[in-house]
Image: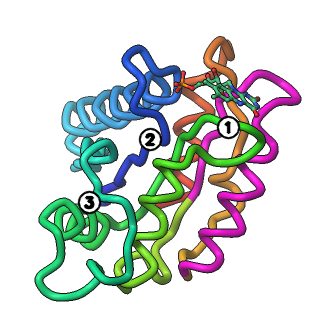
Amino acid sequence: MVQVLLLCGSVRKGSSNEAMLRLVQEVVGDAGEAGNAGNAGNTDSAVFYEGLGGLPHFNPDLDTDPLPEAVTELRSAIADADAVLVCTPEYAGTLPGSFKNLLDWTVGGTEICDKPTGWINAANPGRGEGAAATLRLVLEYTGAAIVEDACVRIAIGDPDIRERISAVLTALR
Ligand SMILES: Cc1cc2nc3c(=O)[nH]c(=O)nc-3n(C[C@H](O)[C@H](O)[C@H](O)COP(=O)(O)O)c2cc1C
């Protein structure tokens, strides 16, 4: 069993990046049902991290015991996962500040080190490159194990969207 933690860079109601990650959950769920029907025992899970909006602003003074509860929850969610999958919008040419804040909170922990990590860039063609580049830079800094085949651009309207998500999950696995 592989558990994938889904990190969304948007807190917006109706977020397209969240929609992509909710579809990832559906794909994982469908694969599980098919696996169970065939007795293949595929019980992978995809957990959507809900806490982005509740994280405090990163402050090294707070990065000490006892950690803020929201930070403990974030680090536990990463520790519990076998892999991490990010889907984030681009704001002003880079990552949204709130999502960079999440990544800053991972630096003081070791949970994300060597964790297989990928991302889906759901922006329209030619867009979102700045966010992807910054994401790579920051993830490299955190020590996450970037899985190149799991770093892809998939448009929400892609006719092969489920197959392409499956390929990302296979690469992460
Ligand atoms: C403040 C702001 C800045 C943005 N800057 C960019 C940008 O630099 N490049 C880009 O491709 N899109 C940019 N966008 C568009 C968002 O990335 C796009 O609307 C995205 O779908 C939002 O993600 P969400 O639907 O998951 O909330 C910006 C949107 C906002 C609100």
Among numbered discs 2 and 3, the one appearing first in the sequence: 3
Which three-letter amino acid code belongs to the residue tagged 1?
Glu
- Residue 60 as seen in the image, left or right of residue 151: left
**Label 2, ligand 1: CB separation under 8 Å:** yes
Label 3 environment density (alpha carbons within 10 Å; few <14, some 14–19, many ≥20): few
Kindly identify which residue carries mark 1.
90
Among numbered discs 1 and 2, the one appearing first in the sequence: 2
Q: Are marks 2 and 3 in contact (CB under 8 Å)?
A: no
Looking at the rendered structure, the secondary structure element under dot 3 is: loop
Of residues 43 and 19, which is closer to you in this image? 19
Asked whether 38 falls inside the magenta stretch, the response is no
Disc sitting over residue 1 in the figure? 3
Label 1 environment density (alpha carbons within 10 Å; few <14, some 14–19, many ≥20): many
Kindly identify which residue carries mark 2.
8
Of residues 76 and 148, which is closer to you in this image? 76
Of residues 153 and 108, which is closer to you in this image? 108
Which three-letter amino acid code belongs to the residue tagged 2?
Cys
Q: Residue at x 47, y 61 (%)?
A: 173
Could you tell me which quadrant the N terminus lies in? bottom left
Looking at the rendered structure, the secondary structure element under dot 1 is: loop
Identify the magenta region.
Answer: 118-142
**Residue 32, quarter of the rendered image:** top left
CA gap between label 2 and label 3 equals: 22 Å
**Label 1, ligand 1: CB separation under 8 Å:** yes
